[in-house]
C-alpha cells in the first residue's frame, strides 16, 4: 500500500523525534552544538553577526532562502542587539537538527516506494 505524502511526513516526524530523543546523547549534542557555533563564529567574538549566521545556515542542506534566514535571525536574536549568542542559538540548533533528520527520513521513505 502506497503512503500519501502526509503519511510519509508523519512517519518522518516520528523518526526525527525518536532520533532526537535517543539517537544522540545530551553530551554529544552539546559538543556538536558548541562546535557548530564555534565554527560559525569566524571572528571568535562569542556571538554570531548576521553574516556569520547566514553563512552557517547556508552551509546546511536545508536550502533556506535569504528571507527565511533573515526571519530566523530576527527570531533568535532575543535581546535584539544585532548578534546571536550561544544561548540564543541553542533552540534554533535543536530545530535545525530535527528538520535535517526529518528531511533525511523523508528522502528514505520516498526511495522505498
Image: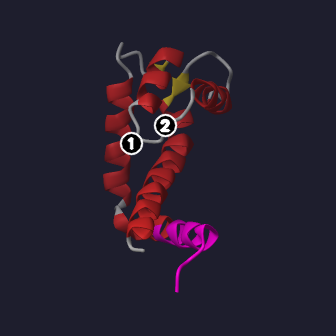
Residue pushed farthest bottom?
Answer: 1
Left/right placement of residue 67 relative to residue 57 reads right
Foreground pick, 9 / 94: 9
Measuring from the top left, give residue 52's x and y in whole percent.
Answer: 44, 19
Measuring from the top left, give residue 90's x and y in whole percent.
Answer: 51, 41
Measuring from the top left, give residue 75's x and y in whole percent.
Answer: 67, 32
Q: Quadrant of residue 66?
A: top right
The residue shown at (56%, 44%) is 91
Please determine whether, in this image, residue 95 is positioned above or below residue 1. above
Residue 90 lies in the magenta-colored region: no
The residue shown at (56%, 34%) is 88
Please determine whether, in this image, residue 43 is positioned above or below residue 66. above
- Residue 81: mark in rendering: none
Left/right placement of residue 33 relative to residue 1 reads left
The residue shown at (54%, 25%) is 84
Q: Secondary structure at mark 2?
A: loop
Which residue is denoted by mark 1 in the rendering? 33
- Residue 63: mark in rendering: 2
Please determine whether, in this image, residue 44 is positioned above or below residue 7. above
Q: Quadrant of residue 72?
A: top right
Q: Earlier in the sequence, mark 2 or mark 1?
A: 1
Foreground pick, 6 / 62: 6
Q: Which residues are magenta?
A: 1-15
Tell me which secondary structure the magenta stretch mostly adopts. Answer: helix
Q: Secondary structure at mark 1?
A: helix
Amino acid at each position: 500500500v502506497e503512503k500519501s505524502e502526509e503519511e510519509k511526513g508523519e512517519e518522518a516526524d516520528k523518526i526525527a523525534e525518536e532520533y532526537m530523543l535517543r539517537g544522540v546523547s545530551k553530551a554529544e549534542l552539546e559538543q556538536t552544538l558548541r562546535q557548530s557555533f564555534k565554527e560559525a563564529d569566524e571572528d571568535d567574538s562569542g556571538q554570531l553577526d548576521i553574516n556569520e549566521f547566514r553563512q552557517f545556515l547556508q552551509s546546511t542542506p536545508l536550502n533556506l532562502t535569504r528571507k527565511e534566514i533573515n526571519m530566523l535571525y530576527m527570531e533568535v536574536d532575543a535581546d535584539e542587539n544585532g548578534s546571536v549568542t550561544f544561548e540564543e542559538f541553542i533552540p534554533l540548533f535543536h530545530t535545525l537538527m530535527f528538520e535535517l533528520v526529518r528531511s533525511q527520513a523523508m528522502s528514505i521513505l520516498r526511495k522505498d516506494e
